[in-house]
Image (cartoon, grey):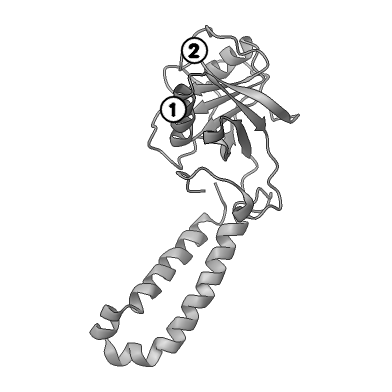
């Protein structure tokens, strides 16, 4: 979640308002005022356009001054239909950070989906994608760890949700988790699951975490359904 997100939305809304003001209908409603102010309003729109684009570009760079430290990214190499960069929110109440980079590692759909009991499928050495619900985040991560996974990604159970990030907290049971755990939006998770099912596989090839520091937004291949 970006620190300057409210500023971004404010700029965009003001920009849209200016565009509406400069429309033909607006000038008909208030002809004298707007005809006198058109040059100033046009210049304002141009300036706001420049700064809104700049804010949208810079705000997504994972710099300590611009994003919370628990935001990380991963990218899918295969299948081709999912070859994008995805955003995660690292659990703050349990688990570890990513102390190494995993290249060409498997992202494996958990079986059962909610990972509230020992997994039926082999996830050793992989990252497990788990559906939210049924038990605590810590329990899911603990079961992934017990299965030999190097990390757990827990997706929202609302497949329409495109920007909600949950701060996954400890369940206060006194247990510990020794692997990284992170939260993924429901839409991203749903699309990953759907495309893997279409490919008749339960796993993708990913790189995690991905360092985007200093990279402009325009060079990052984001999923077409995302908003970040």
Residue at (57% x, 19% y) in the render: 141
Q: Is residue 104 left or right of residue 192?
A: right
Quadrant of the rendered image containing residue 216: bottom right
Q: Nearer the viewer, residue 153 or 205?
A: 205
Residue at (58% x, 46% y) in the render: 221
> Disc 1 designates what residue?
194
Residue at (57% x, 12% y) in the render: 143
Q: Is mark 1 on a helix, strand or loop?
A: helix
The disc placed on residue 12 is: none
**At which x and y percent is residue 90?**
60, 33
Q: Which residue appears farthest toward the left when viewing the image?
A: 29
> Disc 2 designates what residue?
111
**At which x and y percent is residue 17?**
37, 71
**At which x and y percent is residue 19?**
38, 73
Q: Is residue 202 left or right of residue 26?
A: right
**At which x and y percent is residue 91?**
59, 30
Q: Can residue 51 be seen in this view?
A: yes
Q: What element carries label 2?
A: loop
Residue at (51% x, 72% y) in the render: 48
Disc 1 residue crowd, few under 14, some 14–19, many 20+, Cα 10 Å: few
Q: In this view, does 40 lie above or below 49?
A: below
- Mark found first going from the N terminus, 2 or 1: 2
Q: Is residue 113 above or below residue 28?
A: above
Q: Is residue 172 visible?
A: no
Q: Nearer the viewer, residue 220 or 184?
A: 220
Quadrant of the rendered image containing residue 78: top right
């Amino acid at each position: 979640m970006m620190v300057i997100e409210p500023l971004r939305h404010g700029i965009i809304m003001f920009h849209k308002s200016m565009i509406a003001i400069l429309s033909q209908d607006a000038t008909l409603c208030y002809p004298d005022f707007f005809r006198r102010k058109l040059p100033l309003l046009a210049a304002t729109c141009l300036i706001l356009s420049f700064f809104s684009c700049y804010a949208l570009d810079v705000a997504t760079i994972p710099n300590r001054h611009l994003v919370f430290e628990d935001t990380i990214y991963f990218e899918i190499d295969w299948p081709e239909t999912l070859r994008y960069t995805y955003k995660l929110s690292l659990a703050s109440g349990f688990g570890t950070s990513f102390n190494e980079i995993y290249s060409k590692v498997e992202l494996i759909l958990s079986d059962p989906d909610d990972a509230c009991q020992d997994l039926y499928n082999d996830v050793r050495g992989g990252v497990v994608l788990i559906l939210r619900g049924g038990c605590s985040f810590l329990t899911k991560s603990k079961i992934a760890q017990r299965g030999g996974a190097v990390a757990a990604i827990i997706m929202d159970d609302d497949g329409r949700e495109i920007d909600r990030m949950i701060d996954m907290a400890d369940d206060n049971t006194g247990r510990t988790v020794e692997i990284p755990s992170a939260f993924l939006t429901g839409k991203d998770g749903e699309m990953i699951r759907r495309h893997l099912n279409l490919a008749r596989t339960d796993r993708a090839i990913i790189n995690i975490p991905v360092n985007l520091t200093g990279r402009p937004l325009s060079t990052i291949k984001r999923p077409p359904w995302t908003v970040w």
